[in-house]
């Protein structure tokens, strides 16, 4: 899989007309003595700041985690940097990746040296969707902090689309809290929520899996209480009782049955921690 490399920004240079303004006057150098330590810091190449080297976008690859078990630790560290979690639990979750889904994919950069392993740049998890055999749910999308804002997130999502299409799927679903604009630029639109399958087994038919959230538990029939006719209480002798006070008026207008928000942005879906999330989907 080849990805387009963005051109490297040119190194800034000074105009010849401005270079004369930066030259030091040699006749006044004796008035500005420098300590031996400061001279060594300027002249010693070992103390010069090195330019940060970023992975080449054109050489990135997308590979399943279960095909590269030697990179499990590095992938777990990348995810835990964004969502801290027990290392043992994270490794166990990654070890469940398989071709039968859920499937974890890593965005890898080439080896910096022949002896070094590839660098894990990003990660995403794909799961089947209940009742939608043509769809996949994208989860745990993360890119290394030092590489964000440089096109690696877009390359990761584009790689997921290519992989999903190669497996016969035609739609991707995902959730986000604050990256709606990023996914909208990639072609995603707001949608209804779906349910991802945590596991997929060939021994269990789809009809059985789809019955889980709709399962009804057998309960003994409820016996209606027996009502016996009772004589109305007789009013006591003397003055009649005053009438009861009127019922209070409703302060709010009830919502008509069957009404729904006109805009999906008005829907407040929440995750397991109670945080607001938005569901999005894209046809690929």
Image: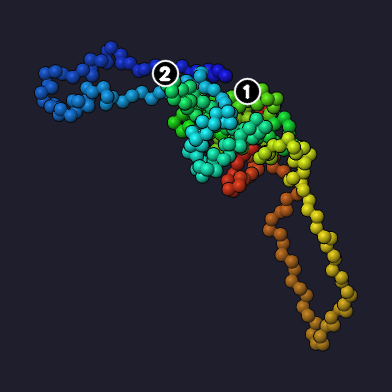
Q: What residue do we see at 74% from left, 71% from top?
A: 245
State left or right for residue 19 relative to residue 89: left
Scheme by which the image is coloured: rainbow
Dot 2: few (<14), some (14–19), or many (≥20) neighbours within 10 Å? few
Nearer to the camera, 191 or 15: 191
Nearer to the camera, 91 or 148: 91
Nearer to the camera, 244 or 171: 171
In x, y percent, where is residue 213? 73, 45
Q: Which residue is mark 1?
A: 162
Q: Quadrant of residue 239?
A: bottom right
Question: Can residue 239 be seen in this snapshot?
Answer: yes
Q: Quadrant of residue 246?
A: bottom right
Q: What residue do we see at 44% from left, 31% from top?
A: 146
Indicate the secondary structure of the residue bearing disc 2. Answer: loop
State left or right for residue 178 relative to residue 167: left
Q: Distance of mark 2 from mark 1, alpha carbons?
A: 29 Å
State left or right for residue 60 relative to residue 44: right
Question: Can residue 138 be seen in this snapshot?
Answer: no
Q: Earlier in the sequence, mark 2 or mark 1?
A: 2
In x, y percent, where is residue 72? 52, 34
Looking at the image, is 3 positioned above or below residue 281?
Answer: above
Dot 1: few (<14), some (14–19), or many (≥20) neighbours within 10 Å? few
Q: Which residue is mark 2?
A: 9
């Amino acid at each position: 899989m080849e990805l387009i490399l963005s051109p490297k920004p040119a190194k800034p240079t000074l105009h010849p007309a401005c270079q004369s303004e930066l030259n030091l006057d040699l006749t006044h150098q004796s008035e500005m003595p420098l300590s031996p330590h400061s001279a060594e810091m300027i002249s010693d190449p070992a103390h010069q700041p090195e330019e940060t080297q970023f992975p080449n976008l054109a050489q990135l690859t997308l590979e399943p985690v279960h095909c590269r078990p030697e990179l499990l630790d590095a992938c777990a560290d990348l995810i835990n940097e964004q969502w801290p979690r027990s290392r043992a639990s994270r490794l166990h979750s990654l070890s469940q990746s398989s071709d039968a889904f859920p499937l974890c994919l890593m965005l890898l950069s080439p080896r910096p040296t022949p002896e070094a392993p590839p660098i894990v740049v990003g990660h995403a998890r794909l799961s089947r969707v209940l009742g939608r055999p043509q769809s996949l749910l994208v989860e745990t999308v993360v890119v290394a902090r030092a590489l964000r804002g440089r096109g690696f997130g877009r390359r990761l999502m584009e790689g997921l689309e290519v992989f999903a299409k190669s497996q016969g799927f035609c739609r991707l679903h995902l959730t986000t809290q604050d990256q709606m604009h990023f996914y909208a630029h990639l072609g995603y639109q707001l949608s209804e929520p779906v349910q991802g399958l945590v596991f997929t087994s060939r021994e269990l038919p789809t009809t059985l899996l789809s019955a889980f959230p709709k399962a009804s538990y057998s309960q003994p029939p409820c016996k209606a209480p027996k009502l016996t006719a009772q004589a109305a209480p007789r009013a006591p002798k003397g003055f009649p009782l005053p009438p009861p006070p009127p019922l209070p008026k409703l302060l709010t207008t009830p919502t008509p049955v069957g009404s729904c928000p006109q805009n999906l942005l008005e829907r407040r879906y929440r995750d397991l921690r109670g945080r607001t999330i938005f569901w999005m989907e894209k046809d690929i």
